[in-house]
Image (tube, rainbow, N blue to C red):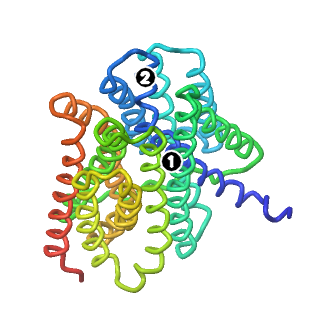
């Protein structure tokens, strides 16, 4: 039993929980936005847009992570980050002002962006090459599990008219677990990092196509996830519980896909899987807005989640094959592309819905997926492996 709680496993579990916390913040947004708007007497577009503080904060954290670890030890930084997250989440219980809520969300986003980078750094320093890949797949699984759990909790709370931030108090409890584990653990050193050898080699066009595709992937994903529940309630007559379940079923599909892809990619390769995932994601998003039957939407949401086939990580892997040496700067830039899509999605989608309706935004999601499919297929045609 003592071996189960050794230092290496503790810090690995901290890394998994970092992904759980961010997903736990993102997953409930489309479910709680309606009750939150009613409670605060604000338009739902304004409420959804306020969550851009969370996503843009996460983007800022990802940028800061490029150099922050040179200044402060990983353990001290994680203690600061998750203390701020805990206090910010608890503050929701005492504020009904959208600006104050936005500031708290921004703090959580900023700290989560840095926390995810710290999690990836912890895993990369703690495991060799072969084991490292499997650990990164598990981080995807924790992200999906959090989407399932927190989506289900938010749905359950909304159905019982519990305070809109109830799910976020569960996330706060997870932050306490992280703080306890960090305080009793030792983390790899980062301040003695050997500086990366500078290079003037330019990234090929195919890398930029993948980076743009990652932006479109997260923008399209959250265009659907944050507005599908609202569409199901207002246009299809779904109950809040039925509408909220759609988000959880998407994450269940994502989790099943992550398990499947970890085996299938060894059989068909990353290049072919990227094409299948991009086309499949676009095609399986269409029935969500084309088929107006609430009874069928849960199955369609699960299939759409599965059709994603871990595309974010697959596109990342594909892009790193296009250079002789996949530098940390390249990986960071690709992740920033995906984070930028998440960060801008509340603002972009809210403006689109305000100008059109909550039906067109679902079609916009499919448009994003169709565009990324074109980009990735083009990248596979242009890229010639050596």
**Is residue 1 placed above or below 293 in the rendered structure?**
below
Image position, residue 284 (x, y; %):
28, 63
**Nearest to N terminus: mark 2 or mark 1:** 2
Of the 4 image quadrants, the one containing the C terminus is bottom left
Rendering quarter of residue 376:
bottom left
Image point (26%, 58%), residue name = 287
Asked whether the beta carbons under mark 2 and mark 1 sit within 8 Å of each other, the answer is no
Give neighbour class at mark 2: few <14, some 14-19, many 20+ (Cα, 10 Å): some
**Is residue 47 placed above or below 228 in the rendered structure?**
above
Image point (56%, 22%), residue name = 92
The numbered disc on residue 374 is none
* Name of the residue lying farthest toward the bottom: 267
The count of marks equals 2
Q: Secondary structure at mark 1?
A: helix
Rendering quarter of residue 213:
bottom left
Of the 4 image quadrants, the one containing the N terminus is bottom right
Image position, residue 374 (x, y; %):
15, 64
Taking the image as shown, residue 238 lies to the left or right of residue 168, namely: left
Residue 30 visible, this angle: yes
Q: Secondary structure at mark 2?
A: helix
Instruction: Tell me how far mark 2 sits from mark 1, CA to CA.
Output: 21 Å
Taking the image as shown, residue 121 lies to the left or right of residue 348, namely: right
Q: Nearer the viewer, residue 361 or 85?
A: 361
**Is residue 303 placed above or below 113 in the rendered structure?**
below
Residue 191 visible, this angle: no
Image point (31%, 47%), residue name = 224
Give neighbour class at mark 1: few <14, some 14-19, many 20+ (Cα, 10 Å): many
Q: Nearer the viewer, residue 292 or 356?
A: 292
The numbered disc on residue 116 is 1
- Residue on which disc 2 sits: 102
Taking the image as shown, residue 167 lies to the left or right of residue 48, namely: right
């Amino acid at each position: 039993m003592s071996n189960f709680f050794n230092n290496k496993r503790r810090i690995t579990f901290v890394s998994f929980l970092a992904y759980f916390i961010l997903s736990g913040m993102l997953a409930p947004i489309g479910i709680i936005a309606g009750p939150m708007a009613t409670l605060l007497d604000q338009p739902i577009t304004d409420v959804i847009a306020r969550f851009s503080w969370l996503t843009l904060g996460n983007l800022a954290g990802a940028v800061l992570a490029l150099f922050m670890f040179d200044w402060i030890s990983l353990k001290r930084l994680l203690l600061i980050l998750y203390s701020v997250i805990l206090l910010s989440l608890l503050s929701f219980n005492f504020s009904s002002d959208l600006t104050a809520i936005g500031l708290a969300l921004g703090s959580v986003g900023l700290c989560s962006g840095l926390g995810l980078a710290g999690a990836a750094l912890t895993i990369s320093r703690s495991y060799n090459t072969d084991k490292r890949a499997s650990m990164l797949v598990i981080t995807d699984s924790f992200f999906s599990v959090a989407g399932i759990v927190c989506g289900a909790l938010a749905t359950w709370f909304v159905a019982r008219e519990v305070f809109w931030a109830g799910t976020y108090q569960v996330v706060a409890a997870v932050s306490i677990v992280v703080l306890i584990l960090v305080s009793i653990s030792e983390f790899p050193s980062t301040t003695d990092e050997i500086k990366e050898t500078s290079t003037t080699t330019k990234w090929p066009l195919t890398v930029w196509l993948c980076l743009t595709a990652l932006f479109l992937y997260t923008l399209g994903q959250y265009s659907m996830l944050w507005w599908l529940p609202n569409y199901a309630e207002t246009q299809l007559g779904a109950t809040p519980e039925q509408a909220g379940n759609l988000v959880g079923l998407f994450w269940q599909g994502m989790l099943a896909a992550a398990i499947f892809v970890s085996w299938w990619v060894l059989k068909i390769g990353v290049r072919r899987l990227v094409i299948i995932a991009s086309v499949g994601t676009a095609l399986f998003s269409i029935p969500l807005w084309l088929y107006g039957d609430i009874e069928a939407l849960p199955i369609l949401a699960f299939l759409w989640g599965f059709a994603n086939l871990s595309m974010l990580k697959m596109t990342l892997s594909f892009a790193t094959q296009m250079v002789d040496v996949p530098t940390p700067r390249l990986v960071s830039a690709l992740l920033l592309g995906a984070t930028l899509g998440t960060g801008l999605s509340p603002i972009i989608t809210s403006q689109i819905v305000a100008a059109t309706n909550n039906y067109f935004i679902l079609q916009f999601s499919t448009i994003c997926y169709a565009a990324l499919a074109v980009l990735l297929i083009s990248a596979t045609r242009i890229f010639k492996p050596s």
